Image: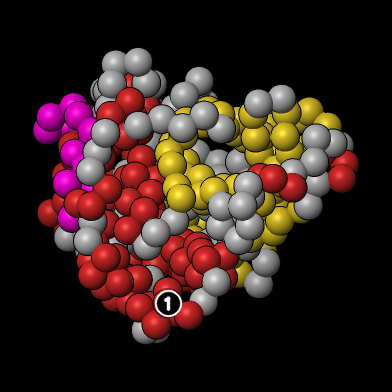
Amino acid sequence: MADCSILPLESSYKFLENILKIANPKLQHETSSKLDFLIEIMGKWPENVPFQNIDQLCLIKREQRMPTVSEIINSQLQGRGGVCFNHAIFVYLLLKSLNYDAYITISSVLSRGDHTVCIANNVQDKGDSYLVEVGTCWPCFAPIPLHRLPTDLSTAKVYKNSFFVYTYVKEGNLVVRYHRKNSMENTNPILSDGWWKNASTDLQPVEIEYIYSKEADIGKTCAAPSGFHAHILIAVLYPQKKCMVLKCNVLAWDENGQKIRKTLKDKCEVVEAIRRLCPMIDEATANEAIEFAEENTILNAALEL
């Protein structure tokens, strides 16, 4: 099992203050309730830490592997963000250093077991459980109370972040996330009353080592040349809680609740968009990712957002 002490408490406080912009995190940690502090962390995360596969594209190009836990910690302490497992592993280690009862589990989006999330237990009351979903294009801005989820989609609480709408229900041993039709890209069939299934999460804990094992599909999705992240270029941030997303050569953003799209005309504009969403990524890294994208003929895909 990975040593949770590899992220010292002092490093966690620095991340919270310098990257998430949480004022005096040590005092808040000591005086706030665990639930309130978790809400503060999750509310700040999408505004300040991008979901991006720029770094992962470069790693696929060079070495066809996932970053190590140490590399994830170093990049997250710089606020670089990353794909799902970068966020999930780091928020798990962060919460453990802050004395939360947290664990990692596997979720399925495009294929079985291709996504990773964090769950925190016994946050406010003994036996409660909250989903901590920060490693996705469409993050939650607050912990989702899994212990209170309904099984009926018609009675589920509806969440709205920027221009997308979603909800969660319990289906057997799974927690299932549904998105509202037309609130974002949808290639899945509409299942019920305008909702489509986005992700299914298994509530069984896994060790960090499992994510890196051959049994998990995450490596295939994120590190293999044939995987999902080798065939898309994406960066997402939520300045002032308004979505701004670069997908291949299309930039989209929230303008007064409306989704505005712009097709970028050349490589320079794509680099500029990457630097805007991920200012900690230098121009050379952005160019390397774009060149790999061009080699895989994905940059000019102009996919619908």
Q: Amino acid at mark 1?
A: Glu
Point out residue 265 in the picture as x, y percentages from the top left corner. 37, 53
Secondary structure category for the residue under label 1: helix
Q: Position of residue 280 (x, y in %)?
A: 23, 64
- 32 left or right, relative to 267: right
**Residue 246 falls left or right of residue 121:** left
Residue 284 vs 118, above or below: the answer is below
* Residue 259 drawn above or below residue 133: below
Tell me, yes or no, if residue 292 can be seen here.
no
Q: Nearer the viewer, residue 74 or 302?
A: 74
- Residue at 28%, 21% (x, y): give it: 213
17 or 108: nearer the eye? 17
Quadrant hosting residue 225 = top left
Residue at (50% x, 20% y) in the render: 112
By secondary structure, the bulk of the magenta-drawn segment is best described as helix
Local crowd size for mark 1, using a 10 Å CA cut-off: few (<14), some (14–19), many (≥20): few
Left or right of 39? Residue 171 is right
**Residue at (18%, 27%) from the top-left corner?**
64
The image quadrant of residue 187 is: top right
In the rendering, at what x and y percent does residue 264 appear?
40, 54
Q: Quadrant of the N terminus?
A: top left
From the viewer's side, name the closer residue of 70 and 125: 125
Residue located beneath label 1 in the image: 30
The number of numbered discs placed on residues in the rendered structure image is: 1
Between 103 and 299, the one lying in front of the other is: 103
- Magenta span has 305? no
Q: Is residue 207 visible?
A: yes
- The spot of residue 40 in percent (x, y) is 51, 71
Start-end of magenta stretch: 60-75
Compared with residue 92, is residue 283 higher up or lower down, i.e. above or below?
below
The reply, left or right, for residue 134 in relation to residue 149 is: left
